[in-house]
Amino acid sequence: MIGVSNLMYQAGVQDIPFMLHTKHQHRTIRFTATLKTSAMKRFDKYQKSLCIVEKDNTTYVKSYETLVAKVEGDELVVFCWWSQTTSKHINYAAKQLGLKINR
């Protein structure tokens, strides 16, 4: 669990929709599902579009409806290439959480 003072915390089990992108044989595949999570945190900036979700002791960064990265130790592991706006979200989240970005 990440404890950062500029994150707002919403308690309770929630169903959070998300998409996960992956590359397979030079094609982008999008998985859409619902992540049942027990914690969701929002930053001061990008409150409507950027949040941290926690599921089974794993922390993810979610931009809009897409999981874009996950926290592994002191790194934020980015799943694939993202748009300029999502990249800004990832960079901001990493800075606020004190993590190095691993692309």
Image (spheres, grey):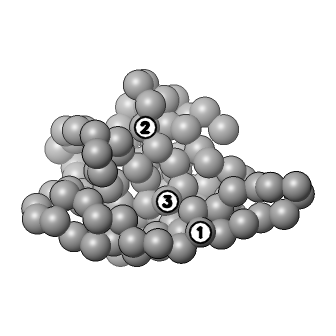
In space, the residues marked 2 and 1 are separated at their CA atoms by 20 Å
Name the residue rendered at 84%, 63% in the picture: 27
Closer to the observer: label 2 or label 1? 1
Q: Which residue is mark 2?
A: 71
Secondary structure of the residue carrying tag 1 is strand
Name the residue rendered at 28%, 40% in the picture: 57
Q: Residue furthest left?
A: 11
Label 2–label 1 contact, CB within 8 A: no
In space, the residues marked 3 and 2 are separated at their CA atoms by 11 Å
The disc at residue 23 is none
Dot 3 or dot 1: first in sequence order is: 1
Q: Residues within 10 Å of mark 1 (few under 14, many from 20)?
A: few
Secondary structure of the residue carrying tag 3 is strand
Disc 3 residue type (three-letter): Leu
Q: Which residue is mark 1?
A: 31
Q: Which residue is mark 3?
A: 67
Residue 98 against residue 11 in the figure, above or below: above
Secondary structure of the residue carrying tag 2 is strand
Q: Residue 101's image quarter?
A: top right
Q: Is residue 96 left or right of residue 8?
A: right
Q: Residue furthest right?
A: 26
Front one among 31 and 83: 31
In space, the residues marked 3 and 1 are separated at their CA atoms by 10 Å
Q: Residues within 10 Å of mark 2 (few under 14, many from 20)?
A: many
